[in-house]
Image: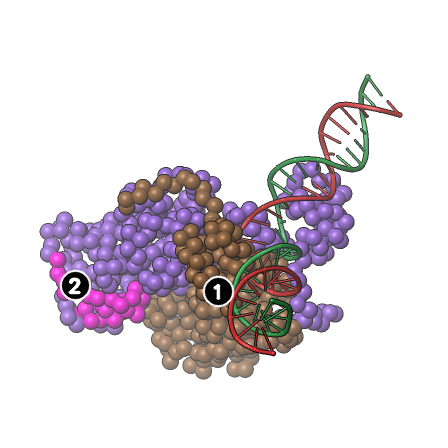
Chain colours: A brown, B purple, C green, D red
DNA sequence: CACAGGATTTACCACGTTGTAATCCCCGTC
DNA sequence: GACGGGGATTACAACGTGGTAAATCCTGTG
């Protein structure tokens, strides 16, 4: 550090015109050099390139964006990136975006309807070419009329083929049913559903439906006492709800948690209450978050292929940007039961 | 859905001029409405606003950028956003950024030097006003010469006051020392350090130093056999390294893991090996990731205040954007020992 | 030496926005 | 009824870039 790096001097960045003037050519020729246009005289190219290097010129992304109408940026909107599921999804999306030369912006909606509306409408400012959106509370009807200026890909539960938007679907009903049927097949009969919030929460609703479908198929009754209310899908709320459940219904012999976060909390509550997992109470979650592999006992779960979601969402987005006239497309995300220790199989 | 919403018509986004024409005013008046300029007639304001809503006009970030020279975007560069620590940090940064009307872009370096260099040079996110950067491998010397067009805030270990860049520091030596001293005070004498990679990994190096400092203070020898090599700071590698460690050094009675992820893996390995935690082997991690609260036993750790980091980093960034001539500033992140079950205290 | 024809370079403009500096309008006052 | 004064609105310009089309240069040919 010989240079003390004087922080002052609000230096204006070097523009294409500065280079042009210094190299005694037109701005357009500089542009041609930068963009490797064929018909540039080798001498000119060399001279311009030297000036570019000497001045440290770098093309302005903003200028290019304005010219091209594209920002090269994609937004990912999720409830919160702090949740392992969305963090991992975001990581995958970021990698895939980067592979395509796109920059990823992250928006958090906190699952609040107003924030979701803002994000879906691209308010307050339009900055991204496209949006990958994982809504939580937003009614489907609103989602079906996306802002026409921005490409949109929806992730999650939705009406399927009828939705006039590109979607990467998650069959949450099937996911839940798979998990609960596994518990029932293992002989459990008093299976709790952990994760009920309210009717507006699409994921919770579908997973409850899958849970009920599994009960129906097994000829078991719906027991409202086994469906405690949960404030948020967090380990803490999962723990609290499970603790309350155990007091109210000590006969419960299995817990299907609508996500792994709650499942982790549920296992902690069970342990605290002296119940053995899986012997006394079996537990199955959803998502296959990394932490579930290293708990004691390890957490059985339904894995949802996040890498698939990320790749498909970006592929859909990019293809739509290339050709907005494409008809809406729908892909379904693979999922599979991951049997570990907590379900007792 | 009465409208089939034909996906076609690659419609040009609505511009301020479209609105102006429809509302029969000048573009500038529309701008004035959008920017809440005082001297706009209420009637005009209402009329323009109606047209804005009807047409779905959203100001273009690009146009504004070109005009103002600011993008209103900040980039956060971390090794990977999938790691709970960085995911949580990113969530906090996103919230703080949003509060300030800034959009957050996320870059993942995967801890690769080449990627870190790219990021530090402003590629590919040159259009961010500022960068919050958490480097892993990058030598300090390189970090001291930031690109002059972009505000930079470094997060993490570094030389402190000497660095001519704004920093939010983490005293990883102190963090590690705090954890290990706690283990030693509890009577452990054969404490392993989990997380050694190589000398270029700044965090690992400083935490190892803290570990050694604690040993020195207690008059205990440095035992290379208690410092296994780890490929990545993941639960799996923590598990593998711990399993190997237990075979090589069955006498180990404590593990200090350089982060919670490895600590979780370590606990799984200990359990698999039939060691009781904390009775046989105590475990302390670093970071205080949420999952550590719900494991069995719960994980003792050193909490690093991520909300503080996020807030400070953005505050530093914003103030530097406002006044680039500010001298470099340095803040230190608070940390504290969180005693849970795994350390046996 | 004029000329065709390709290589090379350039003038012009638009992309969307907003600060600046007018201009315009309306109302009250003398 | 002219005038002052302030609110409301607008013309203009410029931010950096690159497509389009036209201009200019060069070389070989007849």
Chain for numbered disc 2: B
Task: Determine the chain carrying the residue at label 1.
Answer: A
Percent across and percent down for residue A137 are: 58, 62
What is the quadrant of the C terminus of chain B in the image? bottom left
Q: Which quadrant is the N terminus of chain B positioned in?
A: bottom right
Q: Give the range drawn in magenta.
A: B222-246
- For the residue pair A328 and A268, the one nearer the viewer reads as A328
Q: Residue A41 carries which label?
A: 1
Residue at coordinates 41% horizontally, 44% vertically from top-left? Answer: B316
Provide the residue designation for mark 2: B226
Q: Could you tell me residue A258's position as x and y percent?
A: 48, 69
Q: A99 or A173: nearer the eye?
A: A99
Q: Position of residue A262 (x, y in %)?
A: 44, 64
Picture layout, residue B130 above or below residue A173 = above
Left or right: B12, with B153 as reference point: right
Q: Residue at x 48, y 73 (%)?
A: A311
Q: Is mark 1 on a helix, strand or loop?
A: loop
The answer to whether tags 1 and 2 share a subunit is no
SS label for mark 2: helix
Residue A31 badge: none
State left or right for residue D24 relative to residue B164. right
Q: Does the magenta stretch include residue A29?
A: no
Compared with A172, B282 (above or below) is: above
Separation (CA) of disc 1 from disc 2: 65 Å
Give the residue at x 62% y 59%: A121
Query: What residue appears at the point 74 percent right and 70 percent down from the top-left corner?
Result: B2
Q: Please name whichever residue, A120 or B111, is drawn nearer the observer in this view of the structure.
A: B111
Q: Main secondary structure of the magenta part?
A: helix
Residue A280 spot, x, y in % from top left = 37, 73
* Rendered view: B216 above or below A203: above
For mark 1, does the 10 Å Cα neighbourhood hold few (<14), some (14 to 19), or many (20 or more) residues?
A: few
Visible in this render: residue B128? Answer: no
């Amino acid at each position: 550090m010989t240079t003390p790096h004087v922080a002052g001097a609000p230096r204006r960045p070097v523009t294409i015109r500065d280079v042009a003037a210094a190299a005694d050519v037109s701005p357009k020729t500089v542009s041609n050099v930068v963009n490797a246009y064929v018909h540039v005289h080798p001498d000119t190219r060399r001279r311009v390139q030297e000036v570019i290097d000497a001045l440290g010129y770098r093309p302005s992304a903003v200028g290019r964006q304005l010219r091209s109408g594209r920002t090269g940026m994609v937004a990912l909107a999720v409830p919160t990136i702090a949740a392992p599921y969305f963090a991992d999804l975001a990581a995958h999306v970021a990698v895939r975006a980067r592979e395509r030369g796109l920059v990823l912006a992250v928006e958090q909606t906190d699952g609040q309807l107003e924030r979701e509306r803002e994000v879906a409408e691209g308010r307050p400012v339009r900055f991204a070419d496209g949006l990958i959106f994982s809504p939580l509370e937003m009614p489907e009807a609103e989602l079906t009329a996306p802002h026409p200026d921005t490409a949109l890909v929806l992730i999650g539960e939705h009406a399927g083929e009828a939705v006039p938007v590109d979607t990467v679907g998650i069959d949450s009903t099937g996911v839940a049913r798979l998990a609960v049927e596994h518990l029932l097949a293992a002989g459990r009969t008093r299976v709790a559903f952990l994760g009920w919030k309210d009717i507006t929460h699409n994921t919770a609703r579908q997973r409850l439906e899958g849970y009920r479908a599994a009960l129906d198929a097994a000829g078991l009754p719906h027991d409202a006492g086994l469906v405690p209310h949960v404030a948020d899908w967090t380990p803490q709320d999962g723990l609290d709800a499970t603790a309350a459940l155990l007091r109210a219904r000590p006969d419960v012999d299995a817990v299907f948690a609508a996500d792994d976060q709650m499942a982790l909390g549920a296992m902690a509550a069970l342990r605290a209450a002296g119940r053995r997992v899986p012997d006394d109470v079996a537990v199955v979650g959803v998502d296959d978050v990394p932490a579930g592999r290293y708990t004691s006992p390890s957490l059985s779960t339904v894995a949802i292929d996040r890498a698939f979601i990320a790749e498909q969402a970006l592929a859909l987005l990019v293809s739509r940007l290339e050709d907005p006239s494409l008809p809406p497309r729908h892909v379904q995300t693979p999922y599979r039961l991951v049997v570990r220790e907590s379900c007792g199989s």
